[in-house]
Image: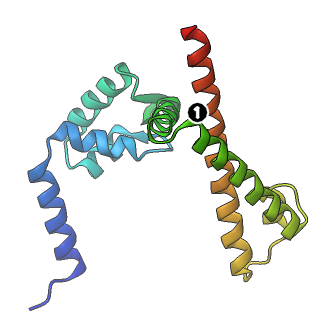
């Protein structure tokens, strides 16, 4: 007998619930949340009660991992984007040395120049306005360009952070 997709999903949820604490599940959901979500929505996804989700979300806010915004009477919770950015910068600084970082920045700048030259535009947003819905390669390039631009910004921030850290140490 084959399992249906619903059976598999139920089993994955049951395994996740058995292998994690309620706090770990709420943490995971908030970590994935870019746009604010209510405690009820987080509770549903984390397989916990709404009061439990609210309590753990408040803990995450108090520790700086999450932040809140209001939507009328509803408090929405989401991950703290500044904290995520600083984590990415620290990880990058730990994984690559200054020379590798500089080489990577040069490579990403060259990639961006190639996109600009190839499409004769100065930004992914400008490219998006020119593309037709069926231009698969163009949309793939648009996604890659945006990702490269984001990665470049993080790499440049890591370099600046590294330089500032060295200056403060002197």
Q: Nearer the viewer, residue 158 or 2?
A: 158
Q: Which residue is mark 1?
A: 158
Q: Nearer the viewer, residue 15 or 157?
A: 157
Q: Secondary structure at mark 1?
A: helix
Q: Is residue 126 above or below residue 94?
A: below
Q: Is residue 80 left or right of residue 163?
A: left
- Residue drawn at (17%, 67%) of the image: 10
Q: Position of residue 68 (x, y in %)?
A: 46, 28
Q: Position of residue 154 (x, y in %)?
A: 60, 40
**Looking at the rendering, which quadrant does residue 11 occupy?**
bottom left
Kindly tell me whether residue 72 is visible in this rendering.
no
Kindly tell me whether residue 112 is visible in this rendering.
yes
Q: Is residue 78 left or right of residue 8?
A: right
Q: Quadrant of the C terminus?
A: top right
Q: Nearer the viewer, residue 43 or 156?
A: 156
**Looking at the rendering, which quadrant does residue 129 occupy?**
bottom right
- Residue drawn at (32%, 31%) of the image: 57
Q: Is residue 129 above or below residue 48?
A: below
Q: Quadrant of the N terminus?
A: bottom left
Q: Nearer the viewer, residue 166 or 130?
A: 166
């Amino acid at each position: 007998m084959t399992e249906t997709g619903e059976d598999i999903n139920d089993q994955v949820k049951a395994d996740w619930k058995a292998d994690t604490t309620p706090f770990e599940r709420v943490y995971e959901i908030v970590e994935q949340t870019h746009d604010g979500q209510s405690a009820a929505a987080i509770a549903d996804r984390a397989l916990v009660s709404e009061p439990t989700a609210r309590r753990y979300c408040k803990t995450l806010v108090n520790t700086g991992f999450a932040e809140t915004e209001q939507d009328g009477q509803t408090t929405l919770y989401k991950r703290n984007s500044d904290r995520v950015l600083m984590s990415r910068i620290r990880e990058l600084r730990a994984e690559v040395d200054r020379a590798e970082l500089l080489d990577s920045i040069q490579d990403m700048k060259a990639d961006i120049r190639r996109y600009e030259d190839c499409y004769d535009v100065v930004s992914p947003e400008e490219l998006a306005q020119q593309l037709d819905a069926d231009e698969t390669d163009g949309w793939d390039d648009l996604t890659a360009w945006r990702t490269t631009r984001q990665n470049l910004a993080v790499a440049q921030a890591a370099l600046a952070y590294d330089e500032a850290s060295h200056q403060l140490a002197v």
